[in-house]
Image: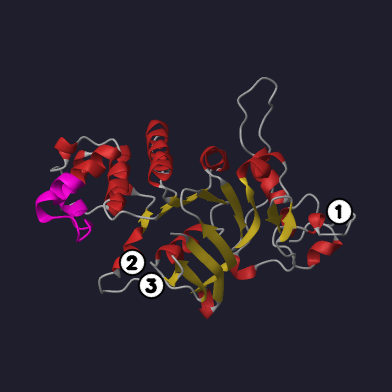
Amino acid sequence: MSLELRDIVVEYRGAHNSMVRAVNGVSLTVEPGKVVGLVGESGCGKSSLARVASGLIKASKGSVLFDGEPVAPLSWQRRPRRELGLQMVFQNPYSSLNPRRRIDAQLLDGVPADVPRRSRRSYVLEQLDRVGVAPDVAGRFPHQFSGGQLQRIAIARALVTRPSVLIADEPVTALDASSQVHVVNTLTQLVRDLDVGMLFISHDLALVRHIADTTAVMYLGKLAETAPTAQLWSQPGHPYTSSLIAAIPQVKAGAGLPVALAGEVPDPANVPTGCAFRPRCPHASDECTREPELWPHRAGRSACWLIHPGTEIPVRPAQPVA
């Protein structure tokens, strides 16, 4: 089963009753057995897109399809059985689990109805063992575990429903380096072993490089670029992608210092005209006052006038926009 996002728009009511567009026409597809990485700076709309994809909130426009069928936003009613295959792993494991309930009780809630009652507990223990949590601790409360253990338990909770697609929204941000490695390895191994699709959302492009088959770069609510991960690293088509890569520290002889990306992400309530990255782009030209499309670029797509198909556009440096 695949997850398809079509022209998703997410709007919020801002200050003075203004409308803020957090996500502006994003389309993505997550296929079985594949990892799609979604990266970008804080405030670019990644988490809003994740909430729409999982059905936690309703898109202002656009559609979310899971196995070809629309995903209904969550309500007080029980989620349709066919949508249980779409599961989310949240950023903070300390708040995603109920502190007043034992771990095994929380996992039992998601066991499919076709699992016999006498086998339900052993089925839950299997999922804990799959993610590297000892089954004999299943009767404990969340506060008795470390952050890394809790995140693996959260993954096990998603697994008990037999998911087809996982949405991992910054799943290692709140963890130490060692726990991050364990959680990322667990997720990627599950994708390969169970043929599960995964949308992996992170601000860490270096991490996404190692686990994603395809990477999408998001800036100020839109996709700046999407491409096979190896191509995106070796031949980025958008200056924003190049800037993100240049800002990553290199651990090798003669690597030099990382290059910080100039400026700040603009206020989503006051998006620059034309290309949104124009105020920070070292290659900004007069053409950039017009909004680019996601044009084909090698095996991917890039929203930059520098790769406009069939046209050689001279790069005429423009003055930064305030």
Please name which of the two marks, 1 or 3, marks the residue nearer to the observer: 3
Residue 205, image x and y in percent? 57, 43
Is residue 224 or residue 136 the one in the foreground? 136
Per the image, the residue denoted by label 1 is 317
Residue 230, image x and y in percent? 64, 40
Task: Find the magenta span and give its range.
Answer: 103-123
Query: On the rendered structure, is 179 left or right of 28?
Result: left
In the depicted structure, whether residue 79 falls above or below residue 147: below
Please name which of the two marks, 1 or 2, marks the residue nearer to the observer: 2
Q: The residue tagged with tag 3: helix, strand or loop?
A: loop
Is residue 201 or residue 131 the one in the foreground? 131
Mark 1 or mark 3, earlier in chain: 3
Mark 2 or mark 3, earlier in chain: 3
**Badge number at residue 204:** none
Task: Name the magenta segment's main secondary structure.
Answer: helix
Q: Residue 301: name its quadrant.
A: bottom right
Determine if residue 22 is in view. no
- State the separation of the CA atoms marked 1 and 2: 52 Å
Determine if residue 18 is in view. yes
Q: The residue tagged with tag 1: helix, strand or loop?
A: loop
Instruction: State if disc 3 and disc 2 touch (CB < 8 Å).
Output: no
Per the image, the residue denoted by label 2 is 82
Q: Amino acid at mark 2?
A: Arg
Q: Amino acid at mark 3?
A: Pro
Per the image, the residue denoted by label 3 is 73
Quadrant of the rendering where the N terminus is positioned: bottom left
Query: On the rendered structure, is 210 left or right of 234?
Result: left
- State the separation of the CA atoms marked 2 and 3: 14 Å
Label 3: few (<14), some or many (≥20) within 10 Å?
A: some
Query: On the rendered structure, is 170 left or right of 299?
Result: left
Q: Residue furthest bottom?
A: 17
